[in-house]
């Protein structure tokens, strides 16, 4: 990925238990699971390295207890890592003084959690404006900003409602708006929709995608739902027992799962919507292929769902072109069938 790195984690550990830091140092930051267990420690995050790129949506997923939520708390220093390095825009996050860390959280990081955490005695506007209030920004400025965000998240007409007067989805919209009040550079969302009913959850996913198209934030989004990860994410990081098992695009995970654990996650993924023509095409320079030269070529970025009808209805393979209109390969019925059913 060519975009700049916004936040980088290198060999991040979080061990719970007495003497965790000295234990990690004693084992050169590479203890085994057996050694961790024998020392009576709990490995919440184990030797995780990953980059979050500017403008991307990185989904972190796994089952309960996999370490996904703990990892983003390490990224934001809501919990202190036992070892490793975390940088934000090239700055060492783990050595920042507390006052600088607080300023960074206030101005550069937005956070949304599963439990909305709204102040029950404050209205929608007052809840959204609260982060600006604690920065001593004057009332007119913060309320004006809150009104802008009310429109962004589609809550016009409910500015003076209290949280108890809102539905779950509406409350979450308030939480999202509040997290955007400081115009953060990076947005952390920890299972923000998991407490919502399925229909409302789908609506909030749509809303999230709409907001991202407007704001183009760098986003780290925690979920346990692979369908949600596929729908929202540019890349997906899958965790198990505190370890990062695999990271890649949804297409990469579906085509090349690194372990049986990852394969279980992707087994029921909608392949036709994820796999692109480029992934299944054959190289015509290396193989003898009967290509229908009179047919309109397929775009390399077309999904199999988009291209399937044309491929199936053609007696010959169809050419594939890149963004410059250059032919880079071809796709036949056999390529399609192999990708879909193997």
Image (tube, rainbow, N blue to C red):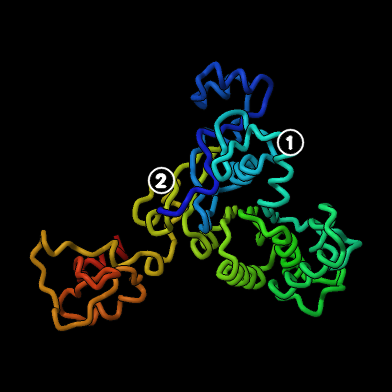
189 over 139 or under it: above or below: above
For image coordinates 11% across by 68% down, the residue present is 289
- For disc 2, the marked residue is 260
Q: Which mark is residue 98?
A: 1
Up the image or down, 125 lies above or below 50; here it is below
- Residue 71 location (% of width, % of height): 60, 42
What's the CA distance linking mark 2 and mark 1?
Answer: 42 Å
Is residue 290 at least partly visible in the picture? yes
Note whether residue 205 is visible.
no
Q: Earlier in the sequence, mark 2 or mark 1?
A: 1
Name the residue located 39 percent from the left edge and 57 percent from the top edge: 254
> Horizontally, is 114 left or right of 340 in the view?
right
- Callout 1: helix, strand or loop? helix
317 lies left or right of 300: left
The C terminus: image quadrant = bottom left
The local crowd at label 2, few if under 14, some if 14 to 19, many if 20 or more residues have their Cα within 10 Å, is few
| Image quadrant assignment for residue 13 | top right
Tell me if residue 263 comes above or below residue 290 in the rendering: above
Q: Nearer the viewer, mark 2 or mark 1?
A: 1
Count of number-bearing discs = 2
**330 or 325: nearer the viewer:** 325
| Residue 306, image x, y percentages | 35, 76
Q: Nearer the viewer, residue 56 or 330?
A: 56
Whole-percent x, y for residue 273 in the image: 40, 69
Secondary structure under the numbered disc 2 in the rendered image:
helix
Q: Where is residue 277, by image quadrant? A: bottom left
């Amino acid at each position: 990925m060519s975009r700049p790195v916004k936040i980088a984690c290198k060999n991040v550990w979080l061990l719970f238990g007495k003497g965790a830091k000295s234990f990690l140092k004693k084992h050169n930051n590479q203890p085994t699971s057996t050694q961790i267990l024998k020392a009576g420690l709990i490995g919440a995050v184990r030797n995780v390295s990953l980059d979050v790129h500017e403008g991307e949506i990185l989904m972190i997923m796994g089952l309960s207890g996999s370490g996904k939520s703990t990892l983003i708390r390490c990224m934001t220093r809501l919990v202190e890592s036992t070892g490793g390095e975390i940088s934000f825009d090239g700055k060492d996050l783990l050595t920042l003084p507390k006052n600088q860390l607080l300023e960074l959280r206030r101005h550069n990081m937005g956070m949304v959690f599963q439990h909305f955490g709204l102040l029950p005695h404050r209205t929608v506007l007052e809840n959204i404006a609260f982060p600006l209030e604690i920065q001593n920004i004057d009332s007119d400025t913060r309320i004006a900003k809150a009104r802008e965000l009310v429109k962004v998240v589609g809550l016009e007409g409910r500015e003076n409602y209290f949280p108890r007067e809102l539905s779950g989805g509406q409350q979450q919209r308030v939480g999202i708006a509040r997290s955007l009040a400081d115009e953060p550079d990076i947005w952390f969302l920890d299972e923000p929709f998991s407490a919502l009913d399925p229909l409302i959850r789908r609506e909030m996913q749509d809303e999230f995608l709409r907001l991202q198209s407007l704001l183009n934030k760098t986003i780290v989004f925690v979920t346990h739902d692979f369908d949600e990860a596929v729908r929202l994410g540019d890349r997906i990081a899958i965790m198990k027992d505190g370890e990062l098992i695999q990271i890649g695009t949804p297409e990469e995970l579906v085509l090349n799962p690194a372990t049986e654990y990852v394969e279980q996650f992707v087994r029921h993924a909608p392949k036709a919507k994820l796999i692109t023509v480029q992934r299944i095409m054959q190289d015509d320079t290396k193989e003898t292929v009967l290509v229908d030269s009179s047919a309109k070529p397929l775009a390399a970025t077309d999904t199999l769902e988009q291209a399937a009808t044309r491929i199936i209805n053609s007696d010959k393979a169809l050419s594939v072109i890149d963004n410059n209109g250059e032919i880079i390969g071809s796709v036949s019925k056999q390529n399609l069938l192999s990708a879909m059913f193997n």
